[in-house]
Image (cartoon, grey):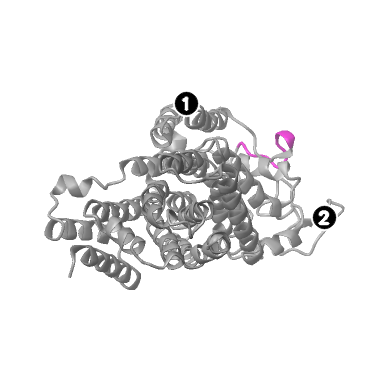
């Protein structure tokens, strides 16, 4: 049995043990990386740790640390109320606001994980407060980021278009952008319909000082505020994401009133003002000065902790450490696979198939599967050159094939093992993380199974021949 096949079988075993024995998959993956790297790939410790995602570790820790502080001092509550006012209380519009916001950030040049890191904690805090499915809100954020991810001035778009130019392949910058935009927009619409969007429309509007969409009298306001609907009472609270009923009432801090400034019910104080400034500084630093999101977030969190230690005392404990272990372990093992050539081995095996259409769909699936655990841009950088030989034959349209590869390799970033999915998982407050992890993993599996075939059918098959 070849070393590459052994490494793939070990990965399957890791998944089986993690799902049947409730062992942290990251810990299993670290053990697998040690065993396969040492016994099969003949790697030393440095070679194994070469795949450790140090940058992602810092992003996960830094961003969750900063937003844990924001939750502790009430800043996220203030932002949630501001979002309600922005859409005039229409809770159903909030997922689309988050979709558009992350899409705009990536379209103008933000790296997708940076945009998700900025928006996801706010979006998921809102989902918790107003009993919106965290799966709906999290996936809307990620698909929004990918919708704008291939604009001609975006990071992903620039990289892929550069690879296409370097390989002397015909390309279309606008076509690539539109393919990703339409694909993610359609997926978002389906998710909205299936994960409670229609119920959100039925709920109508809420007032900014409502707890979970409930008015002071325990009923939900609908329409334009001319009357009360038939919503449930405060005593029927359910877990976040259950849908239909409002979450439990949130405790009010001493400096929160029911009639605060601008009707928000939550007043700005020095700590919250400084936290808002820190969040804006994070956006400016990442987008304007291309600074690392993780290091910037840690620095801002330390400054806030030093100035207001009482608000920040428990924030370190609220960092999603189990998620950090899971993601870093799995990606370390994927790094071992890359180091020993398993990824290239699989790609070359597919590229050598003599049936162009079959090779095309298999490459799309390899891109989706690998990207669900590793760098989307990295896998595109590997797969596009591997597709060159049969693209050169002229039977497969290069523009459609490249667009299909791009969509397949990025739409799966909702996986909890990818950077974006990990950020969503880590950012969700007050949820059952194991359950949310399984939801993201199942949804990611559905996307991996369905989207490459659809992208191939729509973008590649019409250009064949």
Location of residue 386 with respect to 61 vertically, above or below: below
Q: Which residues are magenta?
A: 255-262
Q: Which class describes the residues within 10 Å of circle 2: few (<14), some (14-19), or many (20+)? A: some
Label 2 residue SS: loop
The answer to whether residue 74 of the structure is visible from this angle is no
Picture coordinates of residue 352, whole percent (x, y): 33, 63
Q: On the image, which quarter does residue 3 sit in?
A: bottom left
Location of residue 376 with respect to 431 vertically, above or below: above
Q: Earlier in the sequence, mark 1 or mark 2?
A: 2
Q: 145 and 91: which one is in front?
A: 145
Please name the predominant secondary structure of the magenta segment in the image: loop
Picture coordinates of residue 189, whole percent (x, y): 65, 59
Q: Which class describes the residues within 10 Å of circle 1: few (<14), some (14-19), or many (20+)? A: few
The answer to whether residue 339 of the structure is visible from this angle is yes
Location of residue 158 with respect to 416 vertically, above or below: above
The reply, left or right, for residue 306 in relation to residue 171 is left
Label 1 residue SS: loop
Count of marks overlaid on the render: 2
Q: Evaluate if marks 1 and 2 touch, with contact meaning CB atoms under 8 Å apart.
A: no
Magenta-drawn stretch contains 47: no
Residue highlighted by disc 1:
289
Residue drawn at x 61%, y 49% is: 178
Residue drawn at x 26%, y 69% is: 9
Residue highlighted by disc 2:
223
């Amino acid at each position: 049995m070849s070393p590459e096949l052994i490494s793939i079988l070990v990965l399957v075993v890791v998944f089986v043990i993690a799902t049947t024995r409730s062992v942290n998959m990251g810990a299993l993956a670290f053990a697998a990386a040690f065993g396969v790297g040492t016994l099969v790939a003949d790697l030393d410790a440095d070679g194994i740790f070469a795949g450790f995602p140090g940058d992602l570790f810092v992003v996960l820790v830094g961003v969750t640390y900063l937003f844990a502080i924001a939750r502790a001092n009430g800043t996220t509550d203030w932002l949630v109320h501001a979002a309600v006012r922005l859409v005039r209380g229409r809770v159903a519009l909030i997922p689309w606001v988050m979709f558009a916001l992350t899409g705009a950030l990536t379209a103008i040049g933000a790296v997708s994980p940076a945009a998700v890191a900025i928006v996801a904690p706010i979006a998921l805090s809102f989902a918790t407060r107003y009993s919106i499915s965290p799966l709906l809100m999290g996936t809307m954020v990620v698909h929004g980021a990918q919708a704008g991810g291939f604009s001609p001035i975006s990071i992903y778009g620039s990289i892929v278009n550069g690879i296409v130019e370097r390989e002397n392949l015909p390309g279309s910058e606008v076509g690539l952008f539109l393919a990703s935009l339409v694909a993610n927009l359609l997926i978002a619409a389906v998710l909205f319909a299936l994960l409670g969007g229609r119920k959100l429309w039925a709920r109508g509007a809420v007032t900014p000082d409502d707890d979970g969409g409930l008015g002071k009298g325990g009923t939900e306001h609908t329409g334009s505020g001319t009357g009360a609907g038939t919503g449930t009472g405060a005593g029927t609270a359910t877990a976040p994401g259950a849908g239909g009923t409002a979450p439990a009432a949130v405790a009010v801090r001493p400096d929160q009133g029911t009639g605060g400034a601008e009707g928000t019910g939550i007043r700005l104080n020095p700590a919250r003002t400084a936290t808002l400034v820190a969040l804006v500084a994070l956006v400016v630093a990442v987008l304007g000065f291309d600074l690392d999101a993780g290091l910037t977030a840690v620095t801002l969190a330390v400054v806030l902790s030093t100035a207001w230690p009482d608000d920040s005392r428990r924030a370190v404990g609220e960092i999603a450490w189990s998620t950090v272990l899971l993601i870093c372990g799995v990606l370390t093992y994927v790094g071992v696979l890359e180091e020993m050539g398993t990824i290239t081995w699989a790609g070359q095996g597919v590229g050598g198939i003599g049936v162009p259409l079959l090779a095309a769909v298999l490459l799309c699936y390899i891109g989706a599967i690998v990207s669900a655990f590793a760098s989307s841009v990295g896998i595109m950088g590997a797969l596009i050159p591997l597709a060159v030989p049969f693209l050169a034959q002229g039977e497969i349209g290069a523009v459609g094939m490249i667009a299909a590869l791009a969509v397949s390799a990025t739409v799966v970033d909702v996986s909890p093992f990818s950077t974006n999915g990990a950020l969503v998982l880590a950012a969700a407050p007050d949820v059952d993380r194991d359950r949310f992890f399984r939801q993201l993993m199942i949804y990611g599996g559905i996307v991996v199974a369905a989207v490459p075939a659809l992208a191939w059918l729509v973008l590649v098959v019409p250009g064949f021949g």
